[in-house]
Image (tube, grey):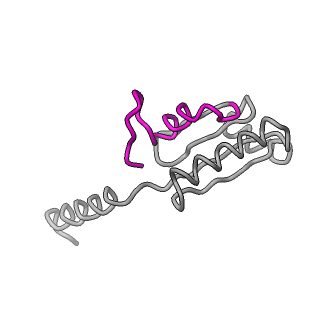
């Protein structure tokens, strides 16, 4: 059994490593088929992710017509809806995601007031 002192040291080293790595994002975009609004939301989101999160995100696109149980489980009541599951906290953004400032703040890439965060 490791001593508390050794465990604390291991925790601090792991914590320092995780702080030095930019977070990975887990995103889910709920859409309703290939409607213009859903298509626009997907195009806007892909552009934002490639510009700000390149190589650090996973995006699942969920069609509520094909997977209504997933929409119900995540309590989706409007389409399109983006869920940011990771990093915490969970965030929901509704609409075509054309308001880039709002999306960047919602994804915690940009702080309120316009300051860029290190994502």
- Residue at the (42%, 49%) spot, across then down: 119
Q: Which residue is at a point 60% across and 57% down the rendered structure image?
A: 58
- The image quarter containing residue 44 is top right
Placement of 23 over or under 107, stated as above or below: below
The structure residue drawn at horizontal position 42% and vertical position 29%, both measured from the top left corner, is: 112
In front: 72, or 92?
Answer: 92
113 horizontally vs 2: left or right: right
**Where residue 94 appears, x then y in whole percent?**
66, 31
Instruction: Answer with the quarter of the image where residue 80 lies.
Output: top right
Q: How many marks?
A: 0
Task: Say which of 19 and 48 sits in front.
Answer: 48
Q: Residue furthest bottom?
A: 1
Q: In the rendered image, which quarter contains the N terminus?
A: bottom left
Magenta highlight range:
95-119
The image shows residue 27, relative to residue 105, as above or below, that is below
Q: Nearer the viewer, residue 39 or 70?
A: 39
Query: Residue, x 61% and y 31% (percent of image)?
Result: 99
């Amino acid at each position: 059994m490791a001593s508390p002192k050794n465990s604390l040291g291991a925790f601090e080293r792991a914590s320092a490593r995780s702080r030095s790595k930019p977070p990975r994002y887990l995103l889910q975009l709920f859409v309703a088929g290939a409607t213009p609004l859903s298509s626009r939301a997907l195009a806007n989101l892909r552009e934002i992710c490639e510009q700000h999160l390149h190589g650090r995100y996973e995006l699942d696109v969920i069609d509520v017509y094909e997977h209504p149980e997933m929409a119900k489980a995540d309590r989706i009541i409007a389409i399109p809806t983006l869920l940011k599951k990771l990093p915490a906290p969970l965030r929901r953004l509704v609409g075509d995601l054309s308001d880039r400032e709002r999306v960047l703040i919602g994804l915690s890439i940009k702080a309120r007031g316009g300051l860029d965060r290190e994502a």
